[in-house]
Image (tube, rainbow, N blue to C red):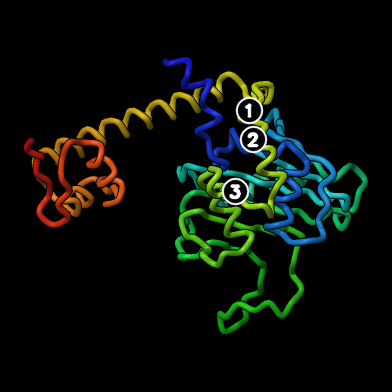
Amino acid sequence: MDKTLFQNLPQKMNLISDLFSRVVFSDRDACQDLVRIILGEGFTVIGVTPQYDISNLQFRSVVLDIVAETENKEPIHVEFQIENDDDHLRRVRYCNGSMDTHILKKGQKFRELPDIYHIFITMSDFIGGGRTIYEVFRSVREPDGQLTSRYPVGNGVHEIYINLEISLGDDSELDHLLRYIKETTTENEDARFPHIISSVNACRKDGSHMKYYSSHEFFEEGRKEGRKEGENQKQNSIIRKMLAMNQSLEFISQCTDQSVDYIRQLANEMPMTVHEDNGYKVDEE
């Protein structure tokens, strides 16, 4: 595999990658920006543990992307998931149970368990409600089958699921942050989360930050990136062949699931004249 692929990998990664986000948000100030924007004021991050490893000799162990500790000893667990290949809700359930067993010491009362926050950021709207943010609350079912929040049944667990498929679109601070997480480019930078931007730039510039990557994870990320590039090259080749066959922009877009603007950009790189309705024809000199 091309060595430059690995050398340039941090330049291509977005923050939705758990591998990249672990490094970026290991910086306390960057994590503080993230927590403040998502949970609001009132949380002061005093420490961050990336790749929080909860080992279990008898049962399944779990490695959490990021666990932030607040001055009030409230753990904040942040997870980034590109793939939708598991039950995310049950994953959070298991992570919560695993964390609780490591928080409460022998002799402590259950009431001493602190509030815990799970922030789960995914690429797709796996819940399927057509919303960007889902916050889960415990409630009681009434005899008539209706759910009510009249009774205090909170157990201190806060679950927030955020997806990047459905845009907030309200130009808020969170809206801009989610765009930056999805596509971590200079165009999506925002002065309202300066520490995140600073940590991203430091990670991309300073090779010493790569010490946080394990060789296996780094290889897997590079392998995925290489496969993605190969798939993109193959699809671009198909698009160019369809352009040469005088197919229209709209028809090629429908066949390849690429936008008309993207196809037009490829067309402009070829010695052809664009015809929006009737395809293309080769320029004659």
Residue type highlighted by circle 2 = Asn
Q: Say whether residue 78 is left or right of residue 232.
A: right
Mark positioned earlier in the residue sequence (2 or 3): 3
Name the residue that disc number 2 marks. 201
Q: Say whether residue 158 is left or right of residue 279.
A: right
Residue type highlighted by circle 3 = Glu
Residue type highlighted by circle 1 = Lys
Q: Nearer the viewer, residue 18 or 128?
A: 18
Q: Of the numbered discs in the image, which one, if any, rests on residue 86?
A: none
Q: Residues within 10 Å of mark 1 (few under 14, many from 20)?
A: few
Residue at (65, 79) in percent of width and height: 148
User: What percent of the width, then of the height, locates residue 88?
Assistant: 54, 49
Residue at (68, 77) in percent of width and height: 149
Report which quarter residue 235 is drawn in: top left
Name the residue that disc number 1 marks. 205
Q: Of the numbered discs in the image, which one, if any, rests on residue 189?
A: 3
Q: Nearer the viewer, residue 240 or 283?
A: 283
- Per the model, the C-alpha gap separating discs 3 and 1 is 17 Å
Residue 63 seen anywhere in this rendered image of the structure: no
Residue at (26, 40) in percent of width and height: 266
- Element type at mark 3: loop
- Per the model, the C-alpha gap separating discs 1 and 2 is 6 Å
Q: Nearer the viewer, residue 114 or 77?
A: 77
